[in-house]
Image: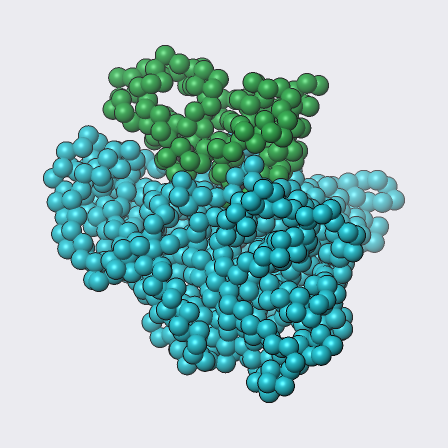
Amino acid sequence: MIKLKVNRKEYNVDVTPDMPLLWVLRDVLGLTGTKFGCGLSQCGACTVHLDGTPIRSCSFPVAAAVGKEITTIEGISENIDHAVQKAWIELQVPQCGYCQSGQIMSAVALLKRIPKPTDADIDAAMQGNLCRCGTYQRIRKAIHRAAELSQA
Amino acid sequence: MQKTSSNINRRNFLRLTGITSAGFIMGLSAKGNNGVPEVANLTNSGLNSLADATEAFELTPFVVIEKSGAITIFNTKPEMGQGVFGAIPSLIAEELEVSMDQITIKQTGGEKKFGGGQSAGGSSSIRSNYNNLRKVGASAREMLVKAASQQWGATVEECYAENAKVFHKPSGKSLSYGDLVEAASKLEVPQSPKLKDPKDFKILEKPMPRPDTPLKVSGKATFGIDVSVPGMVYASVERTPVLGSKLVSFDAAAARKVKGVLHVETSTRTIGIYSYEGVAVIAENYWAALQGRKALKVQWDHQGHDTFNSKTYEQSLRDLAKTEGVVDHTQGDFDKAVAEAPVKVEAFYETPIVSHSPMEPMNCVASWQQGDKLEIWTSTQVPGSIKKDFPKTYGIPEENLTVHTMFNGGGFGRRLYTDFIHDAVQLSKKVGKPVKVIWTREDDTQQGPFRPMTFSAMKGALSADGKAVAFQHKVISPSIDASGRMNYDKTKSDRGMTEGISEQKYEIPNMKNNYVYADLHIPIAAWRSVTSSTLAFAHECFIDEMAVNAKKDPMAFRLELLTKDSDTKNVLLKLKEVSNWDKPLPKGWGRGVAQYEFFAGLGGYVIEVSKKGTGIKIEKIYAVIDLGTVVNPDTVRAQVEGAAVMALTAAIKNGITFEKGQAVQSNFHNNPLVRINEMPPVEVHILANGGPKIKGVGEPGLPPFAPALCNAIFAATGKRIRRLPFDINKV
Ligand code: FES
Ligand code: FES
């Protein structure tokens, strides 16, 4: 049994220790907001926070998450009202939406680290998150907007 | 607002919507005059439920209003990012005088009663529904208004509908739709309801927030890959990346020993004329299935395909370019005009094979149940054809199949194909459990279907005063159509592979366009904007080459060839205006223009670039899309912004190449996509002056991007790029 803390809730899961956190979240805990895109740390669709730091859960063995706070897209707000989510809605960022959980988790972590990021900060923090629909220009605007919203 | 993207079967429908005999159901009858659907009331036939009504009369119940006031609108078009989940229902909501917050949207799953158009592709969703669905909403509104006026003893003119209520102007009295449905449903259906004047629109033509956005920023949107049903197991299927190989034998002993592995079974993937055997490992979770798959030992017979490589194949296309092929279109006397012209221009253009790579890998949940009942949950662009074709393939009655259309994590043409769905259906049938098949990114990148390359042999001639007098675009390529059906006819031009080249509006008196067919054993497919995605590059760069040879400004050269009024001319004029085309640029900069008209619609770009070190920096992107009528301008902008990103990826990233019979690329590390730091913003302008014209949105932003970029690079550097992809950091 492996003991995990996800979105402030404790779980005991019976899986092999090398199983990536992504599949534990999705297939075992039913938290499907975190997505599978590449399985190779190349796309960012699987981004979650480990003690507040963004990680690629597809390439992160579950055993290494023991004793840490895991936060997924489901855990960032109760009512879809995190500043980043509000900005994402205001600027109508998502198209297909598949990459957006990962984009949002990367953006939330960025804003925690740098409350008022520059375009260069955004490039550095967000270039690990692919979007095939091409929502990048809205993502950039929405991050700037979220920075404003959280300062207000 | 309540939303769901899964369709609902009859029982669920009743449970979820609680529809009663007094519900008011409006739809389209398939049996109108001249194939024009009639608006129909589906309630006042003494039938007890929507399901009964629709099954009895084969009508399409697009909107249901219940006594409680609840309003359900059905969306028949799969949502893959293009925005139909809100846009299609908004056509009804606008005319019905209800806000988007007052409706529940439900996604259909290919059911007969919702008609034949249950698919998304060809940028056609809005175009094919705009008038019909507005009529449905307007008829319902007129019936509700009439019911209210009768109740009040008032005239219809004294009453109006707003916000799901009918108001009596003189007295200010009002009745809600829920209170009126019983009476309204007994009235005759107006066949020519008065549609709203666009100036009174509250939803259409306004930047409406998409109803699926909140779901997609909270992880709550259910994509195919997120579906879970009781007792479900997970599968990953091993197939050799050497396409065309046959399965000889396999040893599953080690795979079966992996913790969590439950079964090992074979499964056949069918796509177009091809079919590929594979070995599936089925397990308690997907990770275990992947581990089991790695432990398989499989023998393949490559059938000689393991020597196939891009270099040799591309050379064969260049050799084929020397043959005449078949004529696609002629006008005037091309050969004579070239012979007599003082200036002749020739060039050869090449484009790559690329992958679709939607962010959601291919996946499907299928549940084969007792009594040959089948249920499918999947991200697909074609629920209608699944519902129609799968029962035939598997020998079950159509009513035994239920299809749930989930949110698509990108489509781009890949999800027009149902190959991965067959895996799940066969495996579920074999193991007697619901099975979720997920393709790995490697499967997705290497198994195809791919967008084919096209090579283009271009020839043109100019008169002494620098006017284009002759033009030829000869396309050399494999055929998407031939990949899809056995009885492909090589003696005729393949209009799918010459898409748009004979329909450009330039007035050039002598033309001869040809198609040269090339064999290929690899499944190829439509990819967002199909063949225009490659042909526009050759076509519009070559027009630029002609302009250069004529010593004319590329914009002026094009406009000279457009003396008559046309949408193309309007797009170019708009681009000229918004980009300040005639304003000089800083030193080292250049600007390029391109447009392309094809089945999906018409768009164009002006792109400005500058020299930066050894490479090129994109400074500014202006886009114009020609629509006529627009439903959601914000979605239109988003679609063009996204098309530009996809077009840039196809122009400057690796694409797919073959060595030893298999794709060299396997995942995003060697089949990269443009990332946020590489993408400048796109300024989108929409030409929408109303009127009856209505064009597509999802695709026209793609084809003219690469030629505009390469024309700009020529303007900045004098270097003509004739082969994609190219390295933008080394030009
Ligand atoms: S799925 Fe983890 S980075 Fe792509
Ligand atoms: S919104 Fe579709 S992949 Fe990003």
Task: Estimate the x, y position of residue B296 in percent, counting from the top left.
Answer: 18, 42
Query: What residue is shown at x 19% (from left), y 47% (from top)?
Result: B265
> Could you tell whether B522 is left or right of A132 in the image?
left
Residue drawn at x 36%, y 59% as measured from the top left: B310
Residue at far top of view: A67
Q: Position of residue B370 (x, y in %)?
A: 25, 47
Residue in view at x 45 percent, y 46 percent? B358
**Is B715 above or below relative to B538?**
above
Q: Looking at the picture, does residue B92 appear above or below residue B101?
A: below
Depth check: B594 or B384 in front?
A: B594
Q: Judge by depth and name the residue closer to the eye, B392 or B69.
A: B392
For the image, the number of numbered tags is 0
Locate residue B485, reporting x and y percent.
Answer: 36, 69
Quadrant of the drawing holding the N terminus of chain B? top right
* Colour basis: by chain
User: Which residue: 66% across, 66% down?
Assistant: B548
Q: Nearer the viewer, residue B654 or B12?
A: B654
Q: What is the x, y in percent for residue B375?
A: 35, 48
Seen from this angle, which residue lies furthest right? Answer: B170
**Residue A107 visible in the snapshot:** yes
Residue B123 sits in quarter: bottom right
Residue placed most toward the observer, B648 or B502 = B648
Horizontal side of B240 relative to B723 (left or right) equals left
Question: Which chain does cyan denote in the image?
Answer: B
| Residue B169 left/right relative to B127 | right
Can residue B53 be seen here? The reply is no
Rendered view: B395 above or below A2: below
Chain represented in green: A
